[in-house]
Amino acid sequence: MDGTVLVADDDRTIRTVLTQALTRAGCKVHATSSLVTLLRWVEEGKGDLVISDVVMPDGNGIEALPKIAAERPGLPVIVISAQNTIMTAIQAAEAEAFDYLPKPFDLPDLMKRAARALDQKRRRAPVTEPAQPRTPADDLPLVGRTPAMQTLYRLVARVMNADLPVLISGESGTGKSLIARAIHDFSDRRTLPFVTAQAADLHGMDGPSSLLARARGGTLVFDEIGDFDDESQGRIVRMLDALPTNAPRIIATSQEDLAQKTEAGLFRKDLFYRLSGVTMTVPALRERVEDIPLLASHFLARDARDGFTAKTLRADATEAIRHYPWPGNVRQLENTLRRLAVTAPEAEIGRAEVEATLGAQPAPRPQAGGATDEQLSAAIGRHLQRYFDLHGGVLPPPGLYDRILREMELPLIEIALDATGGNQAKCADLLGINRNTLRKKITDLDIRVTRRRKLM
């Protein structure tokens, strides 16, 4: 790998790590903590690749992309950001960044992307009209740094202007409707109507034509289409087969696995194939536990902007919400944090307030499809296949083996510690491993060890 790389990040450690890695790979590196300095280097003609953070002391890295493209058409920019939201991924795609990586990033993965960017720069034609980034909608709780959510964000960014139907699946409360709305709001159709349709909207002779007239080339969403009856499904098939020139984009959402329903004869095959141009699955909250504190902070900050007293979570309260199963997913977490913002007496919310609020809610029920007779290997295989499917035909980032082992090992040890009341000797015996091995894993996985009791 050869070429000159311009690195802009306000974190000195990141600048040092990237400078050392790129230099060892054969590149020349100029590193700065200033966006103004980066833009000056670009204007002076320096650099074959830019790697830039988003939030800088003197500006925004994504907002600088049009300036870089105008000054140096064809200069690739890789955006790295700790702002792990869907809007960051979409803004980076709209501003025609070469690539986007959330922090903390995998260094070997970043190096491979940098190599591709340098190679592509030598071969591709320059871009003459960069797209302008749009202002993010801060009220969308599409926040997450876990690999599953970052992959979903990238897929949304890739398909938002593709002329293909989209099928979004996921449990109730995961944010399927928010994903559908984001696809519309950040697409070229954003100035046109966004219409959500139920089965009843298809009834009558003019039901389908009335829906198309209301959507007027915008976006038409069939909400929970797995619940539509046979007659409604047939009407949709006929409507999709006779779409007019200014047809709206079609999006469907479903709590159920439509592929399984189709194989079981409970959903029309012809409709399934017409809807599944691009399929994406929104993971359940229990499948991305690391995002729970991030989401909680997001909701509390939003509540403060809405006029509620500013509140924060103490460490013990954060620990409590991390270990609750959240059967209602993100929607339940959002409502719980809103209730705590209103009822908690102090500015800092403690574990007692969290337990009292969660204790007043219905007991968690087993999720649909989670039959108790399903073998563990089958459940793991199902989730791994979903992870691969989320990448939309592209292989996941390197290091998959260690990443999957870590994701399985972390909840296993945490649950075992919960079950043994935090007693490491009992936990090690339960797991069948040496106590020293358990201690090392607790340290490596950054597991907080306390005397625990379950929130049920």
Image: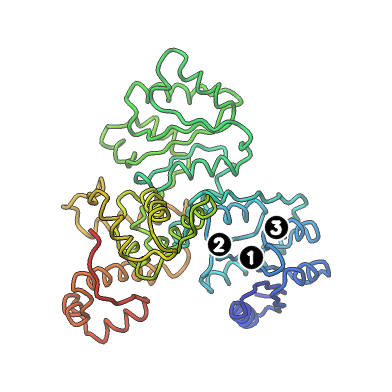
* Name of the residue lying farthest toward the right: 44
Q: Are marks 1 and 3 in contact (CB under 8 Å)?
A: no
Instruction: Please tell me how many numbered marks the rendered image carries.
Output: 3
Q: Which mark is residue 259?
A: none
- Whichever of labels 1 and 2 marks the residue nearer the N terminus, that label is 1
For disc 3, the neighbor class at 10 Å (few under 14, some 14 to 19, many from 20) is some
From this view, report whether residue 307 is shown above or below residue 28.
above
SS of the residue at dot 2?
loop
Q: Are marks 1 and 2 in contact (CB under 8 Å)?
A: yes
Task: Residue 417: name its quadrant.
Answer: bottom left
Residue position marked by numbered label 2 in the rendering: 83
User: Residue 58, percent across and down?
Assistant: 72, 68
Residue position marked by numbered label 3 in the rendering: 63
Identify the residue at image location x=44%, y=21%.
Answer: 238
Q: How far separated are the C-alphas under marks 3 and 2?
A: 14 Å
Compare residues 91 and 44 and report the one nearer the observer. Answer: 91
From this view, report whether residue 141 is shown above or below residue 146.
above
Identify the residue at image location x=22%, y=68%.
Answer: 453
Compare residues 68 and 27 and report the one nearer the observer. Answer: 68
Q: Is any atom of residue 330 visible in this view?
A: yes
Q: How far separated are the C-alphas under marks 1 and 3?
A: 10 Å
Kind of residue sitting beneath label 2: Gln
SS of the residue at dot 3?
loop
Compare residues 137 and 436 and report the one nearer the observer. Answer: 137
* Name of the residue lying farthest toward the bottom: 436
